[in-house]
Image: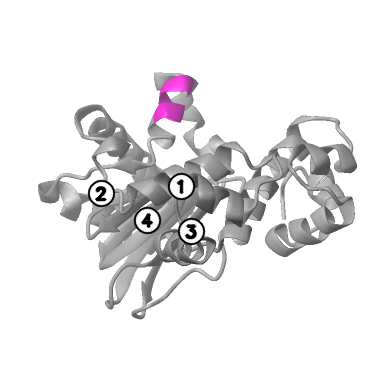
Amino acid sequence: MKGNLKITRVKREPYFNMRQAHFHEQHEIYYLISGERNFTINDHLFKISKGDLVIIPAGDMHRTTYYANNAHERVAIIFDDEVISGLYDEFGKEYIRQVLESYYVQIPEGRRAYVEELMNRMLYEAEGIDELSGHMEKVYFQELMLFIIRCFKNGPQMGELDVTNDIIQNAAKYIYENSDKNISLNDVADKFGMSSSYFSKKFKSVTGFGFKEYLIGVRIKEASHLLLTTSKSVTEIAISCGFNDSNYFGDAFRKIKGVSPNKYRKNKGAI
């Protein structure tokens, strides 16, 4: 089996937050073994608990923040399209994209031990036991993906999640859809009937993002896509994504992606 696959299992202390939102050119499965977390993917906000599984499609901006004063443990699996090319062939790329873009698949409580066992087997093979380990790891991953597809067909999706705050959800959606425009904190706060200081604090507490951080993150996400899929110049992309200054765009891009826009394009998104 071809393609890149990486699995990690990490336990975090109470009040742990991801330092900044990020996005990558591979898909990710995030499974919460214990604890509770706030999760933001693009303009979707929700809370997850023990046994919940989240799918983050390639290129989608995401971040997790603490929900309560407790530790948590998670498994994260990073994989590219090549790893699931067989599923594309079997079920059709459009259908598998629907699964990936559902963001959330509910795992029945009685089947969580099965899911965790598959992940434990993947973690074991990831240690490189012998020359067959890479193949075994991907076989277990294929089984996990088939089970996720079954759950997707039979279970509630994103609409069933506990959205933590409807107003902030709508505000995030508004920012996401208008990120190419010259919008400000005051503009959005006024639109949703809040003072700018209250909206700023509420948005941060619910999403984990500061307003400006979120807006720039959305713009860089779109810029990354355009760099890889169009022949527009860096300056044209900067302007179309809402940046008035191409130098500022370059600095913001490097801060989030770690490389310049030109190098990102040259490397076809590989960092």
Q: Which of marks 1 and 4 is in front?
A: 1
User: Which residue does the image show at 72% across and 50% down from the upper left?
Assistant: 270
Of the residues shown, which amino acid type is indicated by label 2? Answer: Asp
**In this rendering, would 115 be left or right of 269?**
left
Q: Mark 1 points at which residue?
A: 192
Q: Mark 4 points at which residue?
A: 122
User: Which residue does the image show at 49% across and 60% down from the upper left?
Assistant: 195
Q: Give how far across and how far down residue 193 sits, in percent.
A: 44, 50
Chain part drawn in magenta? 94-98
Report the Cα–Cα distance between label 3 and label 2.
17 Å
- Pointers 3 and 4 in contact (CB under 8 A)? no
Which mark sits nearer the N-terminus, 3 or 4? 3
Of the residues shown, which amino acid type is indicated by label 3? Answer: Arg
Judging depth in this view, the residue of 195 and 212 nearest the camera is 195
Q: Is mark 3 on a helix, strand or loop?
A: strand
Q: Give how far across and how far down residue 106 sits, in percent.
A: 23, 43
- Pointers 2 and 4 in contact (CB under 8 A)? no
Q: Mark 2 points at which residue?
A: 162
**In this rendering, would 164 be left or right of 219?**
left
Q: Give how far across and how far down residue 34 sits, in percent.
A: 24, 67
- Pointers 1 and 3 in contact (CB under 8 A)? no
- Pointers 1 and 4 in contact (CB under 8 A)? no
Mark 3 crowd level (few <14, some 14–19, many ≥20, 10 Å Cα): many
Mark 4 crowd level (few <14, some 14–19, many ≥20, 10 Å Cα): many
Of the residues shown, which amino acid type is indicated by label 4? Answer: Met
Which mark sits nearer the N-terminus, 2 or 1? 2
**Residue 63 marker:** 3
